[in-house]
């Protein structure tokens, strides 16, 4: 289940969620998307692998992931139980003790972010919550308590919001001119708040919009898809496709079809992909 937080947080967060039960697959491949994530784990440890050349890493108490630039794998325990936050691209920064760029493609433990004693106390309160609604209320209260001001948040939120509204199609130089800010200043602020530059964020939105619009149940004309997404040649599109999803376009369609076939109408269908 999920809920939209109250006014103190709703400009930073898309939703808070509670997850319990058996996942559709023990391992999911998560393509890069402009969506930072925080998870408080209440069950057995889960595993994260951020690149094919790295080993799995255990996360017992939870993790924080800023806006990724490449696909990563998430391994669920069975059964699983956790609460978490889907942030807007700029929404995680007010809860971090360091610039977001320091965590780009390097998930951090919640203990590293909030400290062991505070995290243990939060997990105890969540474990004692009688219902999912109560657990989400505990998490929301903790986030409100930890909310802090961030330099540059307002301009980043405004411009990143315009990037999001256009699906990454807005010219980045026009954003800077309208905001009366240099490209160097904006790149610095975006990396501090979101973890990536405005140009990289726009690429992420363009790619996400393109891929999620695919009808994988029908034949896909990849040349038309690449051209529609603004790529001048198909090889460039394929290279970026592999960077964002970890898969070739053909393999991506095969895996999405597998999810549709094996778990029709599942809440997770659409972006996470089977990795086992």
Image (spheres, rainbow, N blue to C red):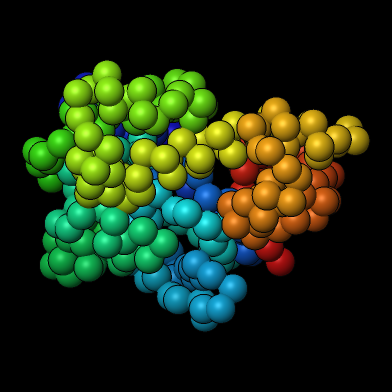
Q: Residue at x 56, y 58 (%)?
A: 71
Please tell me which residue lies in front, 159 or 268.
Answer: 159
* The quarter of the displayed image where residue 164 is located: top left
Which part of the image, by quadrant, shows the C terminus? bottom right
* The quarter of the displayed image where residue 208 is located: top right
> Number of marks in the image?
0
**Residue 179 percent across, percent down from the top left:** 23, 22
Please tell me which residue lies in front, 249 or 136.
Answer: 249
Q: Is residue 213 above or below residue 139?
A: above
In the image: residue 147, left or right of residue 127:
left
Q: Residue at x 52, y 57 (%)?
A: 70
In the image: residue 153, left or right of residue 45:
left
Please tell me which residue lies in front, 137 or 170.
Answer: 170
Q: Is residue 37 above or below residue 72?
A: above
The answer to whether residue 15 is visible is: yes
Q: Residue at x 32, y 50 (%)?
A: 195
**Residue 105 percent across, percent down from the top left:** 41, 62
The answer to whether residue 263 is visible is: no
**Residue 116 percent across, percent down from the top left:** 17, 69
Q: Is residue 104 above or below residue 153?
A: below
Q: Residue at x 44, y 71 (%)?
A: 45
**Residue 79 percent across, percent down from the top left:** 55, 62
In the image: residue 63, left or right of residue 94:
right
* The quarter of the displayed image where residue 53 is located: bottom right
């Amino acid at each position: 289940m999920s809920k939209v937080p109250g006014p103190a947080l709703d400009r930073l967060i898309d939703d808070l969620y509670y997850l319990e039960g058996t996942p559709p697959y023990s391992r999911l491949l998560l393509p890069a998307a402009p969506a930072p994530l925080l998870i408080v784990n209440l069950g057995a440890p889960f595993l994260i692998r951020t690149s094919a050349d790295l080993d799995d890493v255990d996360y017992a108490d939870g993790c924080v992931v800023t806006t990724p630039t490449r696909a990563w794998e998430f391994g669920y325990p069975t059964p699983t139980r956790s609460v978490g936050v889907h942030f807007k691209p700029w929404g995680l920064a007010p809860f971090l003790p360091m610039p977001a760029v320091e965590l780009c493609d390097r998930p951090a433990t919640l203990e590293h972010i909030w400290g062991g004693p505070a995290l243990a106390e939060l997990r105890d309160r969540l474990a004692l919550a009688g219902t999912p609604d109560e657990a989400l209320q505990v998490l929301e209260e903790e986030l409100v308590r930890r909310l802090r001001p961030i330099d540059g948040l307002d301009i980043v939120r405004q411009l990143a919001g315009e990037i999001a509204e256009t699906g990454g199609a807005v010219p980045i130089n026009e954003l800077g001119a309208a905001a009366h800010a240099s490209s160097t200043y904006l790149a610095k602020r975006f990396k501090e708040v979101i973890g990536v530059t405005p140009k990289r964020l726009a690429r992420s939105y363009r790619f996400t919009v393109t891929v999620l619009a695919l009808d994988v149940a029908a034949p896909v004309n990849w040349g038309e898809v690449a051209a529609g997404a603004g790529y001048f040649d198909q090889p460039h599109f394929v290279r970026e496709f592999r960077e964002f999803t970890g898969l070739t376009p053909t393999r991506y369609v095969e895996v999405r079809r597998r999810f549709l076939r094996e778990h029709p109408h599942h809440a997770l269908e659409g972006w996470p992909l089977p990795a086992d």
